[in-house]
Image (cartoon, rainbow, N blue to C red):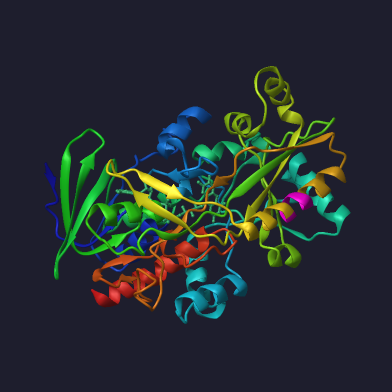
Amino acid sequence: MTKSEANYDVMIVGAGVSGSFIGWYLAEKGVKCLVLEAGSYFHAGNYPTNERDSNSKFYWGGGLEFNTHASIGLLRPKAVGGGSIVNQALLDRFDADALDSWKNRSGVEYFSQKALEKYYDIVDEQLVSQEIPAKYRNGNAEVFEQGFKNNGYICAPLIRAQKDCKYEDGNDCIECLGGCRIDSKQSTPVTVLKKAMDKNLDVVPDFDVTDMQVEDSTTRVSGTFTNGQKGEFSARKLVLAAGAIGNTRLLKQSGFRNPIIGSGFYTHPQHMILAEYDREINAQKGAFQAFKSNDENFRRDGFKLENVFAAPVAIAMLLPGFGKKHQEIMERYINLACIEVAIRDTNPGRIKINKAGKPVISKSLNKLDKTRLKKGTEAIYNIFNSTGAKRVIPGILPIGLHLMGGCAMGLDERNSVVNADFQMHENPNVFIADSSIFPDAPGINPSMTIMALSVKAAETILQKL
Ligand SMILES: Cc1cc2nc3c(=O)[nH]c(=O)nc-3n(C[C@H](O)[C@H](O)[C@H](O)COP(=O)(O)OP(=O)(O)OC[C@H]3O[C@@H](n4cnc5c(N)ncnc54)[C@H](O)[C@@H]3O)c2cc1C
């Protein structure tokens, strides 16, 4: 049994986007912090070098997990750095529409662009973010931009958390979905977490927290290391930053009975739609993403489009057909373009945890969500058809990459789990600020707002200490 000797002020479960930012802020202020992470510590020198290994090493469930109907695939990151290691690193601030919806649902006043601006600015200071210079946009980006022009749709350059991708050396950013081997992607282990570890923050990787106990002046957690060894750690305050599914799992396993925990689960289901061209598109080359939709009609209709592609194993999984037919499309990999439609989903799902500690997820699209999907899909067909596609090939499996909710923030204890100070209603020594507190689906890339809210939460924790 490993027991913590040090006297920690704050213990954080999960070294993902939220856990890293909370740990960084507190460590900068001299608070002694411990971060416990179920995943391993990877870095530029030991990232897996092929797609299959990175899928199995960086995700819970050894890759893809599913909802109960196996109609939506779920990607749940597991590594020091969490989603920031494997994600596409696209940064967006929330618009008034998303924040107004949160304010209405939760009653929390600071859900406004003005009140959050200061926290977004703090995040911006910690990361380098860039648009992709026009000269490095690839064939897939050209299809996207041209198709938008042809149809009178509005698009905008994506902002990506990256420093220097050295495209001129022939780097293909698609590889960084399995960790960026030149440390250009601004994952937390090369930004805030690194700074924090140089100060007052200890990180314990490969440790799955399975139980928590909270008393007035102490919080304790116990769990198991990947090698089977048991461990126990304690601190004055506890932060849960294990993500939407991880927080629900830990709370349920620790005996929290509140039925609100695990409810209100959203995923922005994303459908990748491919198209075959006679010419080479080389969507896998260089900067693999450059544009997003920025069209108020699309926003009103509840979907967004993004210029995207995936490595061969993922594309093979998304393509329809079997055997020779499937192989024939795969042989055209370099002739494929791809656009994703992500739905601002309105049908909340539910996370339950079975006796084996595994998540059981009920999540489906309602009529409105299906209408949103249909409209987004039509726009993509228009884009492809207007740019000379030979045929359009819809991917067969929607994926949930933005896992949100389960511990919603709100003023009313009857329909929320944490209050406006990020404290659990039923236990103020426990704080949560990650994707699990989202009151609904914003329809916008979430990670920058998770970072901003985590900084705000850390400020509050500091006051309470
Ligand atoms: C492929 C992909 C692409 C994406 N692209 C974008 C994008 O471009 N822009 C964007 O804004 N968002 C993107 N996202 C989503 C974004 O990465 C997530 O919304 C974000 O990481 C959520 O932050 P979090 O802190 O809530 O959780 P995470 O970053 O997932 O961190 C949670 C951490 O907690 C750990 N954990 C869980 N349970 C336990 C436990 N019991 N004990 C110890 N540790 C535990 C997990 O292993 C994990 O490392 C993408 C996600 C994926 C998967």
Can residue 14 be seen in this snapshot? no
Is 111 on the left-hand or right-hand side of 96?
left
Q: For the C terminus, give its image quadrant.
A: bottom left
Residue 299: give x, y in percent of width and height.
69, 65
Task: Assess whether residue 279 is covered by the magenta stretch.
Answer: no
Q: Where on the picture, by quarter, is residue 276? A: top right
Q: For the N terminus, give its image quadrant.
A: top left
Residue at left offset 87%, top offset 46%: 386
Residue at left offset 57%, top offset 66%: 93
Q: Where on the picture, by quarter, is residue 208? A: top left
Residue 440: give x, y in percent of width and height.
51, 65
Residue at left offset 37%, top offset 70%: 457
Q: How many marks?
A: 0
Q: Nearer the viewer, residue 347 or 146?
A: 347
Task: Assess whether residue 376 is covered by the magenta stretch.
Answer: yes
Q: Nearer the viewer, residue 144 or 426?
A: 426
Q: Nearer the viewer, residue 81 or 431?
A: 431
| SS assignment for the magenta stretch, majority | helix
Residue 452: give x, y in percent of width and height.
46, 67
Residue 341: give x, y in percent of width and height.
67, 51
The answer to whether residue 9 is above or below residue 268 is below
Pick out the residue farthest to the bottom: 109
Write down the region rendered in magenta: 375-379
Is 344 on the left-hand or right-hand side of 353?
right
Residue at left offset 57%, top offset 55%: 268
